[in-house]
Image (tube, rainbow, N blue to C red):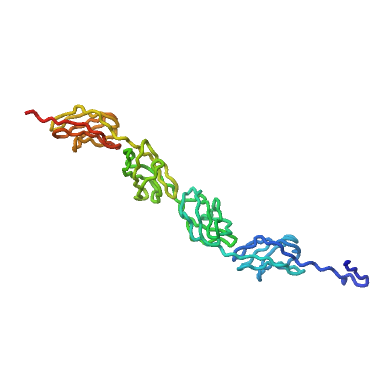
Amino acid sequence: MPAPTPSPHLPAAQQAVPSAAAPTLTGLSPSSGPASGGTVVTLTGTGFTGATAVRFGGNAAGFTVVSSTRITATAPPGSGTVSVTVRTPAGTSNGLPYTYTAPPVVTSVDPSQGPTFGGNTVTITGTGLSGATGVLFGGVPALDFTVLSPTRVSAVVPPGPPGAVQVRVVTHGGTSAPGVFYFYVVAPFLTGLTPDLAPTTGGNTVTITGTGLALTSAVRFGTTPVAFTVLSDSQVSAVAPAGSGTVEVTLTTPGGTSNSVFYAYLSAPAIEALAPAEGPEVGGNTVLITGSLLASTTDVFVGLAPAVFTVLSDTQVVAVMPAGTGTAPVTVTTAGGTSNSLLYTYVPPPG
């Protein structure tokens, strides 16, 4: 149909003018936000020039007309899903849904402790986590995070100072309330072992000393995990496994793995000769014991009787014979074990 032709008999002010079209709304970004309001929402569509109102359901929103196709509005407080509309002098637009979401709830973090240098992965559980946009550890963003389900998020812990921090999850519904803690733990530090050498057969108990040992979860001799008992924050006892040579001993806690201290495995000593191999029953004479691996000698026995001794070298020990009768085995004991035995003969006095 052709457009109406103005009548030449009417004043210009009374001529018919086509009316402007009502606005149309085609998009909201974002389309959800917290029940407390405050989210800045971008409305897209047509015919926004001269807009007089933007409403979220029954509530008016503050807004700015950016162009005829774009408005920014601040969502007022609300609940549930409401219809967003734009009003101009030409009419009211169609409505698009905007959903008010409750803030997430965090109930636990596992593990709840880790090293100050961060980098470990934890699992956060709670409700309303599916739309997570951020994870905070004491206000510091996680290095990375993945939404696993509406109730679980995995996060890579950032570095942090020793102590406890709040773990919070951020969604379009807001930030979870405080109340769940993650503890940054300093890595353990080892200062010594007692003893720090023992037989290759293992089985002996070693006391490990240091700091930050109370939360020990593993003790290793080289790559071998061993049984252990936490005695205090500064002491752990462990049972040495069989081994050889020198190995690094380390200890692990939630704070990380300690520095290394060294543990040496020693073979049992061997003795080859006694000079002299006999002496008076009253004892008191000096005998030179020769052999190998004698440097760490801790005992010399003649039968069941201990002898006073002096270590001369790794191959020689001098012992003062105790009193005795008959023939008795002589042995040398070191941190590596007890040697083979050689016979010493007690000579009775003449007559």
Describe residue 135's horizontal placement relative to residue 293 as left or right: right
Foreground residue among 84 and 221:
221
Task: Let me know if residue 313 appears in the view.
Answer: no
Name the spot of residue 150 as percent of width and height, x first: 55, 60
Count of number-bearing discs: 0
Quadrant location of the N terminus in the rendered image: bottom right
Name the spot of residue 270 as percent of width and height, x first: 27, 32
Residue 322: which quarter of the image?
top left
300, above or below 275, in the image? below
Q: Residue placed at 72% from the left, 64% from the top? A: 25
Task: Let me know if residue 221 appears in the view.
Answer: yes
125, above or below 235, in the image? below
Foreground residue among 215 and 346:
346
Describe residue 33's horizontal placement relative to residue 109 as left or right: right
Outermost residue toward the left?
351
332, above or below 121, in the image? above
Describe residue 46's horizontal placement relative to residue 56 as left or right: right
Quadrant location of the C terminus in the rendered image: top left
Name the spot of residue 170 as percent of width and height, x first: 56, 58
Q: Residue placed at 55% from the left, 50% from the top? A: 143
Name the spot of residue 181 as percent of width and height, x first: 47, 57
